[in-house]
Image (cartoon, rainbow, N blue to C red):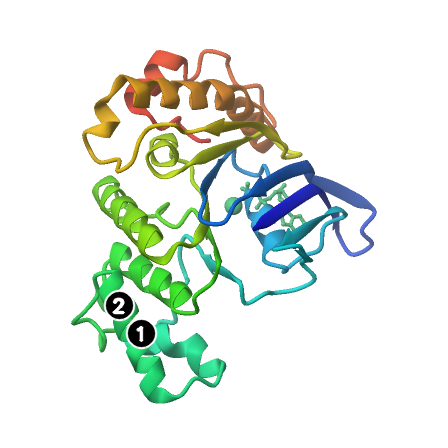
Amino acid sequence: MLEIDNVSKTYGLGDDRTSTVKALDSVDMTIDRGEFVSIIGPTGCGKSTLFELIGGLVEPTEGRIRIEGDPVTGPDPRIGMVFQSHSTFPWLSVLQNVTFGLRMNGVDKAERRRRATEMLDLVGLTGFENARPSELSGGMNQRVAIARTLVMEPDIVLMDEPFGALDEQTRLILGEELLRIWRETGATILFVTHNINEAAQLSDRIAVMSARPGRFKAIVENDIPRPRDGDTMTTAAFNDLVQRLWNELKDESRRGLEQKTGRRVDAESGDGAEAKAETRPADT
Ligand SMILES: Nc1ncnc2c1ncn2[C@@H]1O[C@H](COP(=O)(O)OP(=O)(O)O)[C@@H](O)[C@H]1O
Ligand SMILES: [Mg+2]
């Protein structure tokens, strides 16, 4: 479905582009139709850059991305995106937000309404058609954003920390709902998160990225049987997976922090046991 073939990205900085920053280095992965893949990695390691490349918004410096064998050369209707926030238009109603893309594509009004109504039902927003985003909670806004994207029926959905701004309970509920929607639509999902638990709960595979320049340091298979609910998250298998992911991630998080602050970060900060209890390393 999606091939990320040895992709590197170097950005030129400043007007004359004399200095550069290597955001991604030889990222390589093939993703099957219907897979749910999470990507975790320190801040600034190139996760959003990878999505911009897949979405055809920027070009790779080296390597290629292919969707069903076709090289990506620009935005592709087979790709949909959901971001952490600002994915909805505040001046439009919920219904208008969800029908916006269909209208741009010239879909007639009755059909727009039919598809949007179905999608709003899928994300649990029936009855809120006429509300404005400002009247809704953060979680409901993200439901609108998800509906807006899914109504276009993309084959691949790129979700860049979609629940990053939400409280823990909302995040858990939306996580379970996303799994249900994923089953019902059969979409291929790539999901960036800072939350190791969330990655372990949702995905078939988890790609752990290194600090900048971002590489795939490890790609971890998640064999925990579905459906995964609240009880799953208390099992030993789940905790082992979380521990393993954190082991892969912790040195990279430290390096990422050092890059960001320009200071050495003490090796003690965020060790296994502590991180496991908290399950969310301070700033990954
Ligand atoms: N348009 C751009 N121009 C220059 N540098 C960029 C641009 N976009 C991202 N970068 C740099 O690339 C690196 C990776 O950024 P990003 O992909 O946003 O990381 P992440 O999403 O993992 O936090 C960062 O160092 C960032 O400053
Ligand atoms: Mg990002």
x, y (%) of residue 70?
A: 67, 58
Looking at this view, is 61 or 6 the one in front? 6
Query: As rendered, which of 74 and 212 lies closer to the eye?
Result: 74
Q: Position of residue 165 (x, y in %)?
A: 34, 48
Give residue 280's quadrant in the image. top left
Label 1: few (<14), some or many (≥20) within 10 Å?
Answer: many
Q: Amino acid at mark 2?
A: Leu
Looking at the rendered structure, the kind of residue marked 1 is Ala
Lateral position of residue 159 relative to residue 110, left or right: right
Which of the labelled discs sits on residue 251, or is there none? none
Q: Is residue 176 above or below residue 196?
A: below
> Quick one: SS at disc 2?
helix
C-beta proximity under 8 Å, tags 1 and 2: yes
Is 113 located above or below residue 192 in the figure?
below
Q: What residue lies at 44% left-to-right and 55% top-to-bottom?
A: 83
Secondary-structure class at tag 1: helix
- At horizontal 45% and vertical 11% (from top left) the residue drawn is 268
Q: Quadrant of residue 151?
A: bottom left
Give the answer, above or below, for where 119 lies relative to 236.
Answer: below
Q: How many C-alpha atoms fall within 10 Å of the one at disc 2: few (<14), some, or many (≥20)?
A: many
Which residue has dot 1 on it?
116
Q: CA distance from mark 1 to mark 2?
A: 6 Å
Where does residue 173 sit, x and y in percent of width and height?
A: 22, 46
Residue at the extreme left: 127
User: Residue at label 2?
Assistant: 120
Measuring from the top left, give residue 92's x and y in whole percent: 34, 77
The residue sitting at 35% across, 83% down in the picture is 111
In the image, what residue occupies the spot 22% across and 78% down?
130
Residue 93 in view, yes or no:
no
Q: Is residue 143 visible?
A: yes
Splitting the image into 4 quarters, where does residue 19 fall? top right
Using residue 243 as the reference point, say whether residue 175 is left or right of it. left
